[in-house]
Image (spheres, rainbow, N blue to C red):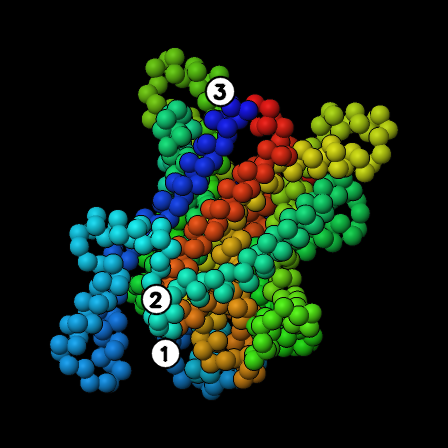
């Protein structure tokens, strides 16, 4: 047990903090390396809006903005202050919907993204892996071969284009799904059956898009993993021993191919998350993706910062949780 | 090389499809050289004409012939993919070879950086970056930037390969006969790693072109340069779908699907070809 903690858990936790450290440092450095000065931009935007502002007011505003962006003091002081505010959970006020704090906007958007992302990952991972294993075990089956062709065709398509095609087909051409949003505009957000049903109806198309691409990926991965396993001696032995096919499939084949797929999930969470963000933009789903889009449109710098930071911490945390449950599936790590 | 292509054409259906798709894409990209006018000139042809013999892809609301525009777009998207792939390949090969061969502390250090980069969600970071550079992010700059983020998956793969090469007897022979480490890595290990590098290059291009689409759609790249992403951006700006100008979106989508499928099928076909076990199974030997 001690060895397990020392050799497995501690390095994972260390890795977790390294990711967050690197991510936060990158988010700190990027704006300071960029040639455009956010304060200057904000000021010139205000000047361009045509209203007359006295020079003294501009100076005062410039100071206030410099303070708010954390641009006062030496680089090192700025960096420490940046961390200080982060640890207190202070991401500053949103510029477009001033003075609502960024954290409040994030808190309303995050559950939507989290729900969509988790549901799609769980469905696509399980379905994709089972289908992938079936594909190499029943190579000649026609239905499986169709799944194979569809997966190969769907896998490489970028999330945005896939979403656009599904939206055009299922909401515009054959309008069976609502065009955008998670509920009709003006609906009161409440905890009632009818509201939940509306949300589910609106979420089906974005969910379907994410699941479709996801299944394609896991299916292909699992198929290539299992196609090597089915010729292993222990599988041949189990077959000769006359074990039921279901048992061979679940206990001998899937059980062994599952581990690299869990690792694969941890390695791809960042990509899947990015995909979910862009998917939300297409479907106008009220999560972090749409929030990002609004922030970009409204030039809301603090909000974009906040989204970036939350994404880094969120994705790193999901990976850490996956690392924690991995030993449950891999006895070798557990018994070490 | 030619015999490999001939064999693949003969035995692998996926390779045949990939071959045709990529050929179509390249022909379209090459057409940009014969375009009668520069891509960003507007109002040269009647607006909003559906696809016809005269305008195979139709014309858009900005008075551009989508065929010529798409020719430039696919060329630029390909250039972006290639630049990103080259940059990220250089980093991946370097990190992978060094970490794999040196092992120990350097390996652990490089791999924990590597794994951190794998986990970091690239899209929000790129959105922040390109938001700050708004409009100033040229196609080449974007390609270089993507290259800086696109290496860690492949570095991992290369390292794993080198780790197993290190245990082979030829490595020991080379070490005992006094081959310096640099020469050993470049002369003896790199050739083994290159097929993997080639396969992942295609995958990396797919990622880069897809990322460009995402950023352009948000209006975060230089939207005056025609790419697959900026085409969709302009179509959205003019609300093409609502206005019924569906071909404005259909053109980039069809071109993208052909390009992506072509590249992906090439990737998976080459990937299987590299692995002798699957290659034998396919040819049936």
**Furthest residue toward top:** B176
Alpha carbons under labels 1 and 3: distance apart: 60 Å
> Which image quadrant is residue A200 in?
bottom right
> Disc 3 vs disc 2: Cβ atoms closer than 8 Å?
no
Chain at numbered mark 2: A
State the residue at coordinates (68%, 47%).
A126
Determine which residue is flagged by label 2. Answer: A93
Q: Which secondary structure lies at badge 3?
A: loop
Q: In which quadrant is the C terminus of chain A drawn?
A: top right
Looking at the picture, tell me which residue is in the foreground, B168 or A111: A111
Which of marks 3 and 1 precedes in the sequence?
1
State the residue at coordinates (33%, 63%).
A92
Chain at numbered mark 1: B
Determine which residue is flagged by label 1. Answer: B41
Determine which residue is flagged by label 3. Answer: B167
**Furthest residue toward left:** A56
Residue A166 appearing in the image = yes
Location of residue B255 in the rendering, given as x and y in whole percent from the top left corner: 54, 65
Look at the picture and state if B123 lies above or below B10.
below
């Amino acid at each position: 047990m001690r060895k397990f903690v020392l050799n497995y858990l501690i390095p994972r936790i260390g890795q977790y903090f390294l990711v967050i450290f690197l991510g936060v440092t990158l988010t700190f450095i990027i704006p300071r390396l960029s040639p455009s000065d956010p304060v200057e931009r904000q000021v010139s935007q205000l000047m361009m809006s045509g209203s007359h502002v006295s020079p003294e007011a501009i100076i005062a505003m410039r100071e206030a903005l410099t303070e708010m962006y954390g641009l006062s003091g030496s680089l090192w002081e700025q960096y420490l202050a940046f961390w200080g505010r982060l640890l207190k959970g202070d991401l500053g006020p949103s510029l477009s919907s001033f003075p609502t704090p960024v954290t409040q906007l994030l808190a309303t958007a995050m559950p939507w993204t989290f729900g969509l992302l988790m549901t799609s990952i769980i469905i696509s991972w399980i379905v994709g892996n089972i289908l992938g294993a079936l594909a190499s075990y029943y190579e000649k089956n026609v239905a499986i071969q169709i799944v194979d062709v569809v997966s190969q065709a769907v896998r490489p398509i970028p999330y945005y284009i896939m979403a656009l095609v599904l939206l055009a087909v299922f909401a515009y051409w054959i309008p069976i799904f609502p065009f955008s949003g998670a509920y009709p505009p003006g609906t009161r957000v409440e905890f009632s059956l009818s509201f939940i049903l509306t949300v589910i109806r609106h979420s089906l198309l974005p969910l379907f898009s994410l699941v479709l691409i996801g299944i394609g990926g896991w299916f292909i991965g699992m198929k290539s993993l299992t196609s090597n396993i089915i010729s292993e001696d222990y599988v041949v032995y189990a077959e000769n021993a006359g074990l039921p096919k279901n048992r061979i499939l679940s206990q001998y084949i899937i059980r062994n191919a599952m581990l690299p797929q869990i690792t694969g999930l941890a390695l791809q969470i960042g990509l899947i998350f990015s995909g979910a963000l862009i998917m939300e933009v297409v479907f106008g789903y009220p999560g972090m993706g749409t929030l990002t889009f609004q922030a970009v449109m409204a030039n809301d710098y603090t909000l974009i910062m906040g989204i970036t930071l939350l994404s880094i911490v969120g994705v790193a945390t999901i990976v850490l949780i996956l690392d924690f449950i991995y030993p449950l599936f891999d006895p070798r790590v557990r018994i070490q | 090389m030619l015999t490999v292509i001939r064999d693949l054409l003969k035995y692998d259906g996926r390779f045949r499809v990939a071959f045709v798709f990529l050929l179509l894409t390249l022909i379209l990209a090459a057409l940009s050289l014969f375009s009668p006018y520069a891509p960003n000139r507007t109002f040269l042809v009647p607006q909003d004409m559906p696809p016809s013999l005269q305008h195979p892809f139709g014309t858009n609301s900005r008075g551009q012939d989508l065929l010529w525009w798409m020719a430039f777009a696919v060329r630029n998207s390909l250039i972006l993919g290639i630049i990103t792939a080259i940059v990220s390949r250089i980093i991946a090969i370097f990190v992978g070879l060094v970490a794999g061969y040196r092992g120990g502390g350097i390996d652990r250090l490089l791999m924990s950086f590597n794994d951190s980069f794998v986990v970091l969600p690239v899209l929000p970071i790129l959105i922040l970056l390109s938001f700050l550079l708004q409009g100033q992010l040229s196609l080449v700059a974007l390609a270089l930037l993507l290259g800086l983020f696109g290496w860690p998956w492949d570095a991992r793969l290369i390292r794993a390969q080198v780790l197993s090469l290190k245990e082979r007897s030829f490595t020991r022979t080379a070490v005992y006969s006094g081959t310096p480490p640099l020469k050993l890595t470049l002369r003896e290990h790199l050739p083994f790693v290159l097929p993997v590098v080639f396969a992942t290059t295609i995958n990396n291009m797919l990622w880069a072109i897809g990322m460009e689409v995402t950023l352009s759609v948000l209006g975060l790249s230089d939207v005056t340069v025609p790419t697959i992403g900026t085409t969709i951006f302009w179509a959205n700006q003019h609300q093409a779908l609502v206005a019924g100008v569906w071909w404005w979106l259909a053109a980039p989508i069809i071109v993208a699907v052909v390009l992506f499928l072509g590249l992906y099928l090439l990737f998976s076909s080459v990937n299987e070809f590299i692995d002798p076990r699957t290659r034998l199974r396919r040819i049936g030997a």
